[in-house]
Image (spheres, rainbow, N blue to C red):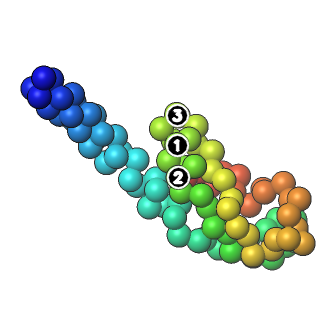
Amino acid sequence: MWPVYFFISYLVLALAIPVSLALAPVWRRTRAPRQVSCPGAGASALVALDPWYAVRMHALGNPEILIRRCSRWPENAGCARECLIGKGA
């Protein structure tokens, strides 16, 4: 029975390593806060993105990113988030 477990473990690793190497750059690009210009207020804002959400969406073929924190919140919490349009992950 151990050879079966070993073979299954090998297959999981053989698939996990290339997938993680392909998704690591997306995680690195989205983990650091970034300075963006806020079109609604006409000023700049510091936003923190959700890197795990970006990785999941990239794996599904969707370039969507999610803002976790913004320096202009809570006063502008209902903004349309145009600051990230065209940025991509």
Is residue 53 in view from this perspective? Answer: yes
Q: Is residue 67 left or right of residue 32?
A: right
Mark drawn on residue 52: 2
Location of residue 76 with respect to 27 vertically, above or below: below
- Please say if the residues under marks 2 and 1 sit with CB atoms less than 8 Å apart: yes
Disc 3 secondary structure class? loop
User: Foreground: 44 or 61?
Assistant: 61
Q: Disc 2 vs disc 3: Cβ atoms closer than 8 Å?
A: no
Q: Which residue is mark 3?
A: 60
Total of numbered circles in the picture?
A: 3
The amino acid beneath tag 2 is Trp
- Amino acid residing under circle 3: Leu
Element carrying mark 2: helix
- Point out the frontmost of discs 2 and 3: 2
Q: Amino acid at mark 1?
A: Arg
Quadrant containing the N terminus in the rendered view? top left
Give above or below for 5 relative to 22. Answer: above
- For label 2, count other residues whose C-alpha is less than 10 Å away and answer few (under 14), some (14-19) or many (20+): some
Q: Give how far across and how far down residue 59 sits, in percent.
A: 48, 38
Relative to 4, say whether 53 is above or below.
below
Query: Viewed as shown, does residue 16 lie left or right of 79?
Result: left
Residue drawn at x 63%, y 67% is 48
Q: Which residue is tagged 1?
A: 56
What's the CA distance linking mark 2 and mark 1?
Answer: 6 Å
- Give the x, y percent position of residue 41: 87, 71
> Quick one: which residue is furthest to the left in this view?
3
Foreground of the two, 61 or 8? 8
- Mark 1 and mark 3 in contact? Answer it, CB < 8 Å: yes
